[in-house]
Amino acid sequence: MSIPGFSFAHKHLLGIEGLSRLDILHLLDLAEEAISVSRQVEKKKARLSGRTQINLFFEASTRTQSSFELAGKRLGADVMNMSVATSSVKKGETLIDTAITLNAMRPDIIVVRHHQAGAAHLLARKVDCAVVNAGDGAHEHPTQALLDALTMRRAKGRIEGLTVAICGDVLHSRVARSNIILLSALGARVRVVGPSTLMPTGIAQMGVEVHNNMRDGLRDADIVMMLRLQRERMQGAFIPSTREYFRFFGLDSDKLAYARPDAMVMHPGPMNRGVEIDSSVADGEQSLIREQVEMGVAVRMAVLEALSQNLPNA
Ligand code: CP
């Protein structure tokens, strides 16, 4: 049930930063309604009927792109997936020129993923339609944080008061950043855990506890969220070897035992099995990883629906 009398006042979704606690709760509540739509045989709603959604992905994606496509289609939008691999970006066209070209085709919503932090903000200044950030460099991945929060809330019944350990390559992670902002806004206690080489300078100023070993970082945690080692964003050697990394920071059943007995395990995907997570844990009874994928479609439906209410002639 969405919050009575509350209206989501944003034209774009560029990050969790800038959303209020009520904005976040409103999106999570809308997503709860979207889960039941996705679980029906007839999965169509008409909220985005007549609207055009362009998915513009400059970086590889399985989960985010496919779930935005399904979300748009389930809401009745015409969805176009723009393949950068076969577009004029390959001939040297800039993000801005691509955006201006697409804008001339009068889309209502552009969903963008780009390797540069700030790309979604830049796009939002150049186009007339709503823009959704599907991940910009190491900056933010707001719909991932929303789907993680929805998964946690459904598994634990609340977010407030949970201890959440976010583990691994925090330095290069937009997922970590968006989750820290969201979970802090909803009253969770957030820890970041990983080698000091993979911790951003000044991360403690975001109000998190910082740990450099799994024993301390996972102690009494309700949620253990593992992050992928993001080699595509690494310039230089941040770890001695993946074998060594797994030994100290990879989540296996021995390290999971440091957390609460009823702790749940999350991972945004794609996973590197045997590097940051062992298969026995990823596929085990405490894993929420498959639920996260289902919640991804629901959250993206919620975001598209909330933004659609602020489109012209809505
Ligand atoms: N979690 C996530 O963003 O996955 P994809 O890169 O597959 O979209």
Image (cartoon, rainbow, N blue to C red):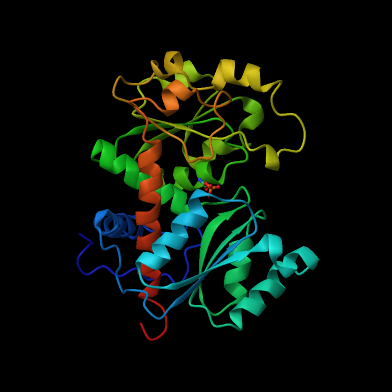
Q: In which quarter of the image is residue 24?
A: bottom left
Is 71 on the left-hand or right-hand side of 93?
left
Quarter of the figure with the N terminus: bottom left
Q: Quadrant of residue 265?
A: top left
The residue at the point 75 percent across, 29 percent down is 237
Q: How many marks?
A: 0
The correct choice, above or below, for 245 with respect to 200 in the image is: above
Say whether residue 16 is visible: no
Is 236 on the left-hand or right-hand side of 49?
right
Is 93 on the left-hand or right-hand side of 60?
right
The correct choice, above or below, for 195 with respect to 118 in the image is: above
**Which residue is situated farthest in the right direction here?**
92
Is 48 on the left-hand or right-hand side of 115?
left
**Which residue is situated farthest in the bottom direction here?**
313
Q: Residue 262: x, y in percent?
A: 29, 24
Q: Residue 35: x, y in percent?
A: 28, 54
The residue at the point 65 percent across, 58 percent down is 58
